[in-house]
Amino acid sequence: MCALAELMAGTGFLVSGSDRDDVFYTDGILKALAIPYHENFSPSHILDSFDLVIYSAAYTFEANPEMAEARKRGLTIMKYTDALGLYSRYFDSSGIAGVHGKTTTTAMAGQLIRAAGLPAQILAGSAVKGFNNRSTLNLGNKYFVAETCEYRRHFLSFHPRRIVLTAVESDHQDYYPTYESIRDAFAEYCGLLPPDGELIYCADDPGAREVAAIMKSKDPSPVLVPYGFTAEGEYRILSYRILGERAEMKLAGFPHELTLRIPGRHEALNAASALALISSLVAGEFGNGTAGSGWTEERREQVRKALEDFAGSKRRQEILGEAGGILFMDDYAHHPTAIATTLDGLRSFYPGRRIVVSFMSHTYTRTASLLDEFAESLKGADIVFLHKIYASAREQYSGGVTGRVLFEKTAEKKDGVCYTDEPEEAEEPLRDILKAGDLFVTMGAGNNWPLGEKLYNYYCGKEGTDR
């Protein structure tokens, strides 16, 4: 919603809004853009002068007083994803989709698009350092690259000419009760591609491969472009190695060795997908439209340098800083697969550091459906602090799984597991546990991220006292 507000404000709309009183990084973005907002919901916020009311899928007409008031007054009302889809019709649009990796891939693509000199707008699901800590980057009006969400089939409103598909597996169990149901939703989205459209998919991911196979059986079929360690063709990752908190990788169709500052083989996959997308745009803008055309040595070097400079996006392996010899990081990983791959990447990047994690699971239905997988995924950390489940306004859950149940299940699989109901209650015990050389990570889609900031600030002050 914040990203859409950025785009609309930049286009000349007068934008205002409402949200819960929780503090998120988006508050700072909205203030910097002088976009006014209320920190509660009230019918009085809805005015007859509004031309359009856009709402988030997190809320319903039955539960949200502003949505109910807008409907009562007969105002034009549109869901966020429908508004985004309408916006995408005015561009040559590319959608980034997948259960994991879509935010980082979109952020990477944006910085590579800028380096390649392409006239495009980019919309990511989080603030990006390379976007001046905003969620959007406006470089022109020809191409549009946006992160598109699978929840409740919201991405079906989008109008893609290209789709990057990073991963397909069971998630959002409150809406997709089976793997097949979420797989079929991704297949339906990819079915929106025109006959000459492109599906850029991860050949290493079984679900993405399955969707690509479904698309291949269609007549006509979109152009299928695989990427990954097992892919055939230009975007096969030939090598990947860690050298001094840097990763080096080689792509079959890119003449230069590529360097990444962010850890994990999954980030190498994200980079390969972003390069595949950029190559398609470069071929259309500067070449003859055929794969591989439009590149110059200067453009390749600019793109290579942009990838090396990529520092991630908000809440995606975001380094807060180092204090007291402890490296503090925040990460959004909220699915077992993402947790496991993130911890594996951190372990390879920082082999000498003990990894201490605060994890707050998001939604009861996801936690209940993947309870064993969550417990298994956290084995990659040395010490884990677990907390209550961060509930979603969009789900109804009456089962017995709680944060403490996840704690008990995880403690069965590994030592060093602790529990505090509220994240802030972990601050004092963590002060006794953390020591120089550690990596401390707040992880998940909940509201435990302030814990990392508090601890970082504490150790910054302690350093000052020691000096």
Image: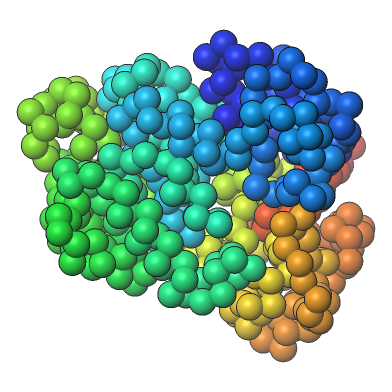
The quarter of the image holding the C terminus is: top right
Image quadrant holding the N terminus, namely: top right
Tell me the quarter of the picture where residue 111 sits: top left
Most foreground residue, 231 or 248: 231
Say which residue appears at 37% left-offset and 17% top-offset: 140
Residue 76 falls left or right of residue 387: left
Give whichever of 253, 301 is nearer the camera: 253
Q: Is residue 397 above or below residue 119?
A: below
Residue sitting at x 64%, y 68%: 174
Residue 388 drawn at (x, y percent): 83, 66
382 or 163: nearer the eye?
Answer: 163
Q: How many marks?
A: 0
Q: Is residue 308 visible?
A: no
**Residue found at x 69% / y 27%:** 75
Residue 225: where, in percent of width, then height?
20, 53
Residue 171 is situated, as x and y percent measured from the top left of the image, at: 55, 67
Left or right of 400, for residue 84? left
Left or right relative to 360: residue 370:
left
x and y, in percent, of residue 287 in the image: 11, 26
Does any portion of residue 152 appear in the rendered image?
yes
Pick the front one: 323 or 24? 24
Q: Residue furthest top?
A: 12
Q: How is the image coloured?
A: rainbow
Identify the image quadrant of residue 218: bottom left
Is 96 placed left or right of 161 in the picture? right
Note whether 30 is above or below 432 in the view shown: above
Q: Residue at x 35, y 61 (%)?
A: 187
